Image: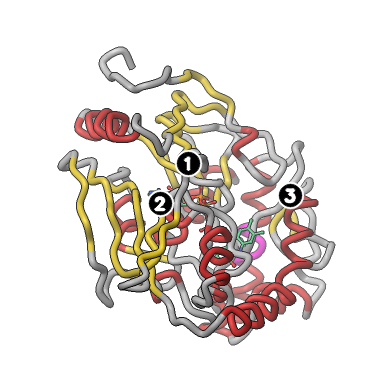
Amino acid sequence: MENYNFKRPVQENYNLTKKHLFKKIAGNARYYYELRNDESLDNDLEELSKLYQDDMPFRIYGMHTNLYITSNGYEGMFIDMSPKKSYVKFDEESEEFICSGNLLTTQLVNFAMKKGYDFASLAGVPGMIGAGVVGNASFATGKEFCDYVKRITLFDFESGKYVEITPDEKSFSTRNSFIKKANQNKTRYFVKEVVLWSEQIGENGVRAKYQAQMDLRTKDLRIGYLEGCAGSIWSNIDLRNKIGVSFRKVVMGTDVFNVDFNGARYSKFGSRFFTLNKETTEKDVAKLMKYTIDKMEELYHIKPEKEVIFLDYDGEVDIDTYINRYI
Ligand SMILES: Cc1cc2nc3c(=O)[nH]c(=O)nc-3n(C[C@H](O)[C@H](O)[C@H](O)COP(=O)(O)OP(=O)(O)OC[C@H]3O[C@@H](n4cnc5c(N)ncnc54)[C@H](O)[C@@H]3O)c2cc1C
């Protein structure tokens, strides 16, 4: 790392356990760095651009709410975007909300609600705006992030420059975006700023929609935070398209998924989110994943899509790679 001039020291052999939100022992990152939304950001993004040119792997994360980190850690640089110094500004004329990538989605929803602008479909979606755009986050069948996005300012590690993108209908799909696709094997883009727009329906109208969504979500979210678990490990949108119901409904309708592979299981407390213990190994998790895929095939003749990101030693891996590696 001596060839790179980051503004603060890069840490080596950094343990990722506390970056893993659902109570598992995670391995070490070879390098760890925290990006900050201050005067150091431009310099640090330029340094990351040099890493990109040198083929040194790195991944950038927000609040880790969509992330499973294996016990083998990550052999590249694990980068956090600090949530500090985030901002949201409202442009009265264009009625646009200009948000830093590290703003929490809940902060936008609440800020806009007071002005009567409707982002209620994002109520209860944890994490940062930048990640929400990358993963085109949404709840159930409501509006997705892409329905609100006007413009995105990205840092492009390939050119070493900022670019402003106006997305079109090809830019996003279910839980996916051109950014996620471009970053799949090598991190090319960082989301710096996002401009969003929504309808003005008045504060009371937004509050009613917000409350209706939170009434559906609060219990599960509380279980998630208390118990420590990922949100939907399997894409509910995908399942609704294929079999008409969410994974929760699938699990509630049968005892088949009431299994426990040394702590790897679906929460018994009602949410049916994926969870595990400190003792749970990769083999146990892989067994639960394989079991689920096999049973879904047997019961519904479909293969569910994984939603949570699995970070292994060499980067983000798909579910088949993960299962083949650890069983
Ligand atoms: C209890 C619970 C409930 C959830 N409910 C929902 C839900 O209703 N709807 C939904 O869609 N999701 C849901 N999720 C998943 C998760 O909250 C979303 O995917 C969220 O957008 C992730 O935000 P994050 O900041 O935690 O991102 P992280 O998990 O830290 O990262 C997610 C991805 O975004 C990328 N990324 C993050 N920041 C940037 C950036 N600035 N530039 C480029 N790439 C970046 C990362 O590389 C990674 O690939 C839930 C999760 C939990 C734990």
Residue 296 higher or lower than 233, as above or below: below
Residue under the image location 29 percent in, 32 percent down: 48
Q: Where residue 281 sits in the image (x, y, percent)? A: 68, 39
Q: CA distance from mark 1 to mark 3?
A: 27 Å
Which quadrant, please, contains the N terminus?
A: top left
Q: Residues within 10 Å of mark 3 (few under 14, many from 20)?
A: many
Left or right, residue 271 beside residue 190: right
Report if residue 106 lies within the magenta region: no
Q: Which mark is residue 100?
A: 2
Sequence-first tag of 1 and 3: 1
The figure's colour scheme reads: secondary structure
Q: Residue 126 at what x, y percent from top left?
A: 59, 58
Q: Amino acid at mark 3?
A: Gly
Q: Is residue 27 left or right of residue 280?
A: left
Q: Residue at x 64, y 34 (%)?
A: 18
Few, some or many residues within 10 Å of mark 1 (<14, 14–19, 20+): few
Residue annotated with mark 1: 85
Task: Identify the element where label 3 is drawn.
Answer: helix
CA–CA distance between discs 2 and 3? 28 Å
Q: Are marks 2 and 1 in contact (CB under 8 Å)?
A: yes
Image point (60%, 84%), residue name = 205
- Residue ID for mark 3: 228
Q: Could you tell me which secondary element the residue under label 1 belongs to?
A: loop
Mark nearer the N terminus (2 vs 3) = 2
Mark toward the start of the polypeptide (2 vs 1): 1
Q: Are marks 1 and 3 in contact (CB under 8 Å)?
A: no
Secondary structure type for disc 2: strand
Q: Quadrant of residue 289?
A: bottom right
The range drawn in magenta is 289-293
Q: Amino acid at mark 1?
A: Lys
Picture coordinates of residue 92, whole percent (x, y): 37, 70
